[in-house]
Image: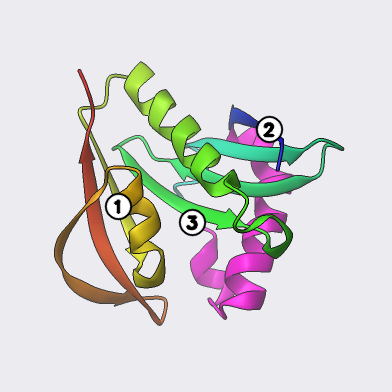
Amino acid sequence: MPVTVLICPWSEARERARAIRYTVFVEEQGVPVELEWDEWDEPSWHALALAEDGTPVATGRLLPDGHIGRMAVLKTARGTGVGAQVLEALMEKAELLGYPELVLNAQTHAAPFYAREGFAQVGEEFEEAGIPHIEMRKRLAG
């Protein structure tokens, strides 16, 4: 699926990223809405994948400490490579900012996706928002 991935501050991403995250996390996965919104949106960089017609189809965020999170792809765009494009854009932004390493808490079903992008599992599985996760890390060239 051809998309354009934008990296922008929360002030620019808010409406579109919230809509995607609400659909994926709250509606599809049953994450309590009060857990979805936190204090980390404002200081983070956000990726937005836009389809050719401008429709937002995926999002993710890069926190100031090098964590990647809130990766979400709408059902209509899953399996098309859009998630990898969002992740790649976030990794490029992290390299530009000079981060030595990236960390993420992957839903365990998504761990193979992150492994293909160079992330390695660290530690044991744990539960977050009622969903099994695994911590994964990737060193950046620097």
Q: Position of residue 86 (x, y in %)?
A: 53, 40
Which sits earlier in the primary sequence, circle 3 or circle 2? 2
Disc 1 marks a residue whose amino acid type is Ala
Q: Is residue 90 left or right of residue 119?
A: right
Q: Secondary structure at mark 3?
A: loop
Query: Which residue: 24% across, 60% down?
Result: 135
Residue 140 in magenta stretch: no
Residue placed under numbered mark 2 in the picture: 12
Q: Earlier in the sequence, mark 3 or mark 1?
A: 3
At horizontal 45% and vertical 34% (from top left) the residue drawn is 88
The image quadrant of residue 26 is bottom right
- Residue that lies at the very extreme toward the left in this rendered image: 123
- Tag 3 and tag 1, C-beta contact below 8 Å: no
The kind of residue on which mark 2 rests is Glu
Q: In terms of image quadrants, where is residue 23? A: bottom right
> For the point 27% across and 43% down, which residue is it?
118
